[in-house]
Image: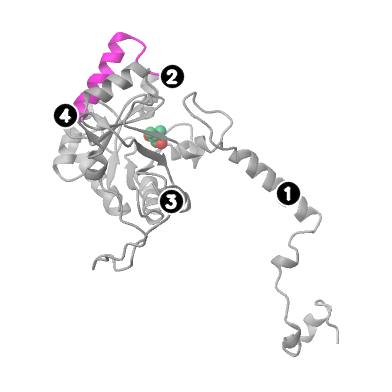
């Protein structure tokens, strides 16, 4: 798509300011898959801040406020400690920073598993607090009843199967899933169960490629691969991973940039200039205008080199 914004002047009473462009909707994303074929793959990246959302928005169809913010933003070991409040704060920032993409917010561990009612309460809270269009939750068949409960009550849901990081304490690690026949079958079955429950999209994370291809063919929902297959209906990556923010990433991450190196170089140059007193320089300083000299308090005149 074009990265040039067109001003959308058809304002509403609810939002009287003209927007740069109309936001995509969940039905528009769903409509990309026709008779099992997605001619235009869905582009998704994670975002946790307004500025990142601004930079990614024009290039993406969906922005995911992932609970991966645990590791990326908060330096936590896993996604387990993430709270609803954290997701709401970052979700609202991403909605404020975007005009075009469908914003999806992850439901944090412990906010939805106990019952469909608990999940509804948490999901409604997220949508009210953030203005996002959809929530994402982890788990397959076991979550199908909950997904149906949310969708039937007006909350669009993205499912997430395969490697599900919130289950780290059960899985024991972040290795790819589906190496046994039984596990492969289970993952495809999980995707089908979520599809039948009404999930409009399903993230397939860290699965053997044939599983991703089979699941993509088996469901009406848009499959979004991460460590899955280019034949999924779309792809997602953690933005900081693909920008090269971290030294170690999963095998499925492709680095499109080396932002960690660039930050390191910039910080090194800044530190050097501060230490040698060459920053701030003339371009970054405010000086009294000569014509205003009579307005400068005498005590400042000599410091400014205007001792008269
Ligand atoms: O939390 C997250 O960022 C995710 C993606 C990796 C799919 O769930």
- Distance CA(mark 3)–CA(mark 1): 32 Å
Residue assigned mark 4: 196
Residue range of the region highlighted in magenta in the rendering? 175-196
The residue carrying pointer 2 sits among few (fewer than 14), some (14 to 19) or many (20 or more) residues within 10 Å by Cα, namely: few
Q: Nearer the viewer, residue 80 or 73?
A: 73
For marks 2 and 4, give the one nearer the viewer: 4
Gap in Å between the C-alphas at discs 2 and 4?
27 Å
Mark closer to the chain start, 3 or 1: 3
Residue sitting at x 52%, y 28% = 249
Q: The residue tagged with tag 3: helix, strand or loop?
A: loop
Against 179, is 151 above or below? below
Q: Earlier in the sequence, mark 2 or mark 4?
A: 2
> Looking at the picture, how far across and down is residue 99, in whole percent?
36, 55
Residue toward you, 281 or 274: 281
Upstream in sequence: badge 4 or badge 3 = 3
Q: CA distance from mark 4 to mark 3?
A: 35 Å
| Quadrant position of residue 9 | bottom left
């Amino acid at each position: 798509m074009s990265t040039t914004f067109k001003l959308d002047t058809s304002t509403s009473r609810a939002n009287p300011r003209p927007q740069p462009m109309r936001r995509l909707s969940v039905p528009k994303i769903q409509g990309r898959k026709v008779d099992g074929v997605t001619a235009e793959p869905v582009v998704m990246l994670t975002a946790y801040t307004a500025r990142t959302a601004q930079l990614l928005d024009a290039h993406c169809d969906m922005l995911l406020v992932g609970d991966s913010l645990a590791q990326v933003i908060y330096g936590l070991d896993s996604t387990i400690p993430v709270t609803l409040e954290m997701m709401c704060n970052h979700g609202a920032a991403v909605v404020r920073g975007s005009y075009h993409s469908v914003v999806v917010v992850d439901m944090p561990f412990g906010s939805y598993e106990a019952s469909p009612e608990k999940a509804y309460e948490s999901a409604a809270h997220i949508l009210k607090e953030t203005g996002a269009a959809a929530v994402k939750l982890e788990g397959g068949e076991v979550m199908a009843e909950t997904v149906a409960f949310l969708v039937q009550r007006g909350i669009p849901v993205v499912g997430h199967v395969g490697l599900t990081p919130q289950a780290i304490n059960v899985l024991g690690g972040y290795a790819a899933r589906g190496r046994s026949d039984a596990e492969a079958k289970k993952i495809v079955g999980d995707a089908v169960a979520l599809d039948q429950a009404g999930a409009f999209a399903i993230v397939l994370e860290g699965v053997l490629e044939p599983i991703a291809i089979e699941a993509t063919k088996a469901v009406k929902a848009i499959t979004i691969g991460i460590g899955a297959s280019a034949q999924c209906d779309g792809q997602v990556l953690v933005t900081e991973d693909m920008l090269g923010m971290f030294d170690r990433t999963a095998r499925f991450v492709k680095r499109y940039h080396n932002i960690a190196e660039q930050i390191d170089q910039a910080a090194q140059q800044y530190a050097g200039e501060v230490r040698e007193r060459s920053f701030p320089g003339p371009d970054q300083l405010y000086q009294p205008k000569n014509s205003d000299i009579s307005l400068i308090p005498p005590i400042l005149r000599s410091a400014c080199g205007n001792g008269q």
